[in-house]
Image (spheres, rainbow, N blue to C red):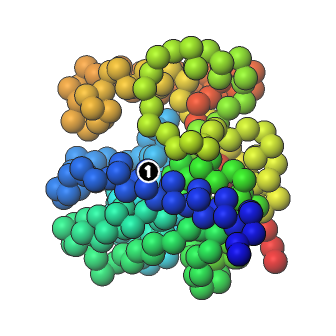
Amino acid sequence: MLDQPLKERQERWREEASFFDKTVAEIDLRPMDPLALARYRGPLRRKFNKEYRLFLLGDLRGKKVLDVGCGEGTNSILLAKLGAAVTGIDISPKSIEIAEKRAEINQVAASCRFVCSPLETAELEAHTFDVVWADAILHHIIPELPLVLGKLTEWAKPDALMVFCEPVNFNQTLRRIRFMIPVKTDVTPDERPLEFAEIAVLRHYIPDLRLQHFTLLSRLDRFFLVNYNYERSPWPRRAISNLCASIDSMALSIPGIRRLAGTAVLYGHPAKA
């Protein structure tokens, strides 16, 4: 008979896999938008979240990248297009199936491999990856954060760069206001933004952890950008998004205002064994 913690863990895995299987069911498998690829090839603008993360990574040619919670492969394909050898891991079988098809369509299948597994039980070779990349994953696994971070740092090379992008909540008043605004979001039952307690856990595994804060006025992008697509929005809408990002970049450099950020890029190197 399974012990209760394992039962609870397996039930959470089933819920997460089911949620994301349904989420990706209608994914469009067209090749990557050439405008998006051109954007992320540079020159990179550090006021934008993903461009900032790619700036941190530098030249990816010849590097091994672990895409944690790769989903249907959007980031994996981009990283492979930029020269990396990518291993994507995700709990959703449907997502992994689509990621494999996406890699074939984008002609990077030789540079990608995908693993379907919960992070907690995955077995990957130790000290393998030059980069550990995770996009909005840790806030789904807060109860398992020490276990997962232990695995990620084990799989990373000693000098690897670990880069996470996560929703954050460093201001409870702003969080309460957010719940008063009727904006529909699709979320899994247990997820929530990272708070100071989780940052402390991250520092245990990534001693030189640094945070770059994003998303103050850029919360409004959902109203300006067509289908939340920067590249395919008309230039006046992109100009508004650019302005919001520029204001955010300046405002969120101020310690008092920094706590109003909605997301953060967290990065550093694994603790020495």
Q: How many marks?
A: 1
Q: Is residue 172 above or below residue 165?
A: above
Element type at marker 1?
helix
Q: Which residue is at the far front? A: 1
Amino acid on which disc 1 is placed: Phe
Q: Is residue 72 above or below residue 111?
A: above
Residue 242 on image: x %, y %: 39, 27
Q: Residue at x 72, y 24 (%)?
A: 171
- Which image quarter is the C terminus in? bottom right
Residue 99 on image: x %, y %: 32, 65
Q: Is residue 120 left or right of residue 240?
A: right
Q: Residue at x 59, y 56 (%)?
A: 12
Q: Residue at x 75, y 69 (%)?
A: 3
Identify which residue, 108 or 16, lies in the foreground.
16
Q: Is residue 262 above or below residue 159?
A: above
Residue 220 on image: x %, y %: 43, 21
Q: List the residue tagged with mark 1.
A: 19
Q: Residues within 10 Å of mark 1 (few under 14, many from 20)?
A: some
Q: Is residue 145 visible?
A: yes
Q: Residue at x 30, y 81 (%)?
A: 110
Q: Is residue 149 visible?
A: no
Residue 22 on image: x %, y %: 35, 51
- Which image quarter is the N terminus in? bottom right
Identify which residue, 162 or 151, lies in the foreground.
151
Q: Is residue 175 left or right of residue 57?
A: right
